[in-house]
Image: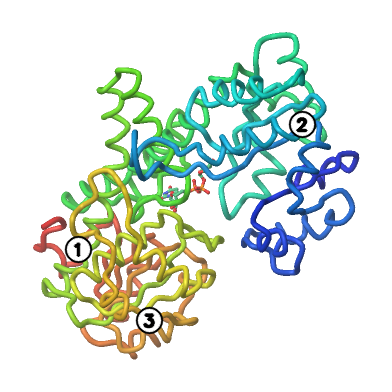
Amino acid sequence: MAVIALKCPDIEVVVVDIFEPRIIAWNSDHLPIYEPGLDDVVKQCRGKNLFFSKDVEKHVAEADIVFVSVNTPTKTQGLGAGKAADLAYWESAARMIADVSKTDKIVVEKSTVPVKTAEAIEKILTHNSEGINFQILSNPEFLAEGTAIQDLFNPDRVLIGGRETPEGKKAIQALKDVYAHWVPVERIICTNLWSAELSKLAANAFLAQRISSVNAMSALCEATGADVFQVSHAIGKDTRIGPKFLNASVGFGGSCFQKDILNLVYICECNGLPEVASYWKQVVQVNEYQKTRFVNRMVSSMFNTVSGKKIAILGFAFKKDTGDTRETPAIGVCQGLLGDKAILSIYDPQVSQEQIQRDLSMHKSELDRPPHLQPASPTAIKQVTFVWDAYEAAKGAHGICILTEWDEFKTLDYQKIYDDMQKPAFVFDGRNVVDVDKLRQIGFIVYSIGKPLDAWLKDMPAVA
Ligand code: UDX
């Protein structure tokens, strides 16, 4: 919304939320989320044509276009628990819009929702409309965190789905005119509602599938002596495959991939397509496998136990340049290590101690969660300390475990770190950011995902 305000000075944008502290934060110098470049955009527009308010009903009533970006978490209870999206927030937003509206409106689905949600929303709106015309559009967001502003300034495409009626087409055109302020029209794709909704789930499923594919290959590389860098470079040169999103890692995280795939799985099941459902489910299962495999590598390399050993965790966010920890692979890895009674010292430049504590004690309703990746008990949480410095985290540690690819981890003084650690000193690089040869020269035993194994690790099983 801030980028729309920046690019469309003729449009007034009001962001509303029922949660007042968040609105206060958006109106302050400390925005509630960290995203490179966002501060600047907000500062340029706030008070001019960008406003943040808790007066939800007033501003919805006044608007011509309402973007709904409420949370759609995975249901934890009832029908479809663990897979289906919980649309309770969406439904109450729709009812509120219907209640307060006095003029015709375009209602835009911005939250990622299961296919055919628009139909349900349309019913709620029209059954409560009292003669007002609502047009529903689906306008899924493809930005990635950490690069959100750049992605929005220069999107690969903008997708707008709507009804194929004259009124539907008029609404699509109205939203297209907003984006056309800065996005070349050939990049604005207009489709029917269901194609737009499904495209978002499909795009995330395809992206996540690439990561699970390369991660599955990483296990085979370790078993055979192939190097996953060389393999992904070689296959990425095929223009049909392309080089992006082929970095092997400890697993993908973030608020979208897992949730959207589980949603897709559920939709397939509901449509009587069990084979298609299990095909996509496998993408999530390989992601779980990758985390389990990583923990097992660590434990087996360190003489089959990490009990009582200090391990420095560098990075907790699900990727660099964000403080977001939703579904971060760090949660599963830390829980696995705590399950084996390790003592963790965690450092992430953007994640707070409170957040990490919440994440580690969280119960999750995931499909087929490996039994050792259970929420950490209150006693285990006591084995976790939080520091604001990578060197401090590594002091006296037996091993270092890199779980987020923050740039600063590439340029740490690893000699200094090595000198302060217990020996043998281990580095487990879950993001392939360190210079393996250099670290081995210093004396570290290094495990890098999908790379030829250190002699130390060769005879040790990857998955016990
Ligand atoms: C994703 C989609 O990219 C975006 O289009 C959609 O709108 C929302 O979901 P995001 O979750 O912000 O965006 O992050 P993304 O950059 O896609 O990374 C997801 C996860 O995959 C991260 O944990 C990242 O570290 C991991 N990843 C990514 C890999 O492990 N290897 C890769 O090659 C790329």
Decide which of 429, 237 is in the foreground and name it: 429
Location of residue 221 with respect to 352 vertically, above or below? above
- For mark 1, give the secondary structure: helix
Residue 447 is drawn in which quadrant?
bottom left
Where is residue 415 shown, x and y percent of the image? 38, 84
Answer yes or no: is residue 178 visible. Answer: yes
Eye-nearest disc, 3 or 2: 2
Disc tally is: 3
- Sequence order check, earlier mark of 1 and 3: 1
Neighbour class for label 1 at 10 Å: few (<14), some, many (≥20)?
Answer: many
The way the protein has been coloured in the rendering is rainbow
For image coordinates 22% across by 49% down, the residue present is: 219
User: What amino acid does circle 1 point to?
Assistant: Arg
Where is residue 405 shown, x and y percent of the image? 45, 62
Decide which of 48, 218 is in the foreground and name it: 48
Disc 1 under 8 Å from ligand 1? The reply is no
Measure how far apart labels 1 and 2 are at the Cα level: 58 Å
Residue 373 is drawn in which quadrant?
bottom left
For image coordinates 74% across by 9% down, the residue present is: 166
Where is residue 240 shown, x and y percent of the image? 45, 28
Q: According to the image, label 1 marks what residue?
A: 297
